[in-house]
Image (cartoon, rainbow, N blue to C red):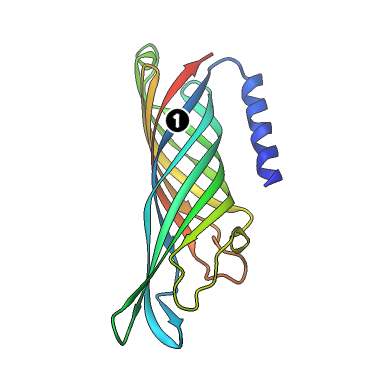
Amino acid sequence: MKKIIIASAVLFSVAQLSAQDLDLRIYGGTNVLQLSTDNSTNIIDGVLHNTTVSGRPGYQFGVAATIGKRFYIQPGIQYTDISTEIVNENNKTGYEFKDKTQLQILTVPLHVGFKVLPEPMAKIVNFRLFGGFSGHHVLAVNHHGISGEITEITKDDYSNLIMSADFGMGIDVWFLFLDLNYGLGLSPVHTANGDGAKANSFNINLGLKFGF
């Protein structure tokens, strides 16, 4: 976690030194998480269960600095709240065990992008394409509905640094902006003895931008 905080501080220092063509963006939005895993079954109390994992709506808010004119770099820092639901269906009886996990995460994204429209139109409205990477660190875990032999889940069950590749598009209108972003999981969510699951997510953010 210290590495993420230090990296974020360095990125914002660079933004402050690049005062020209700089804007600060404050935003909030919603997300849906989907875990990818090869485990489609689970053994609970000695009985085989079919396992499905689905994402539930979550939210995020953060701040980012956009540096550059047509081509830009955008470091940021973000608080993310995501939720998943695991359903284990008994192969014999059809009975379902449900477990819900809520994660609070510190996210540090670093994106590069391209603004489609040139000046002076860009001062009023613009479209953006962007991509990059994000590092995620789990701050806290809230686990509900423990069932069968499934044990309590804590943040120690998650990797210290979870990486994703981001792809998205956005629109700027005056001082408002809207971003659509897809995060593709690159590293396992759980620790070394986990199931190898990776986290993919879809995010929508609405925010305000302030030029300097």
Q: Residue at x 29, y 85 (%)?
A: 93
Residue at horizontal 61%, vertical 24%? 15
| Quadrant in which residue 5 is drawn | top right
Nearest to the observer: residue 45 or residue 73: 45
Q: In which quarter of the image is residue 190?
A: bottom right
Residue at 56% across / 52% down in the picture? 163
Is 68 in front, or is 193?
Answer: 193
Location of residue 52 (image quadrant): bottom left
- Look at the image and tell me in which quarter the C terminus lies: top right
Q: Name the residue under label 1.
A: 27
The crowd level at tag 1 (other Cα within 10 Å; few <14, some 14-19, many 20+) is many
The amino acid on which the numbered mark 1 sits, given as a three-letter code, is Tyr
Residue 5 sits above or below residue 51 on the image = above
Question: Could you tell me residue 113's position as x and y percent?
Answer: 47, 32
Tell me: 177 left or right of 6. Answer: left
Residue 6 placement (x, y as % from top left): 70, 38
Q: Where is residue 55 drawn, in percent x and y?
A: 38, 57
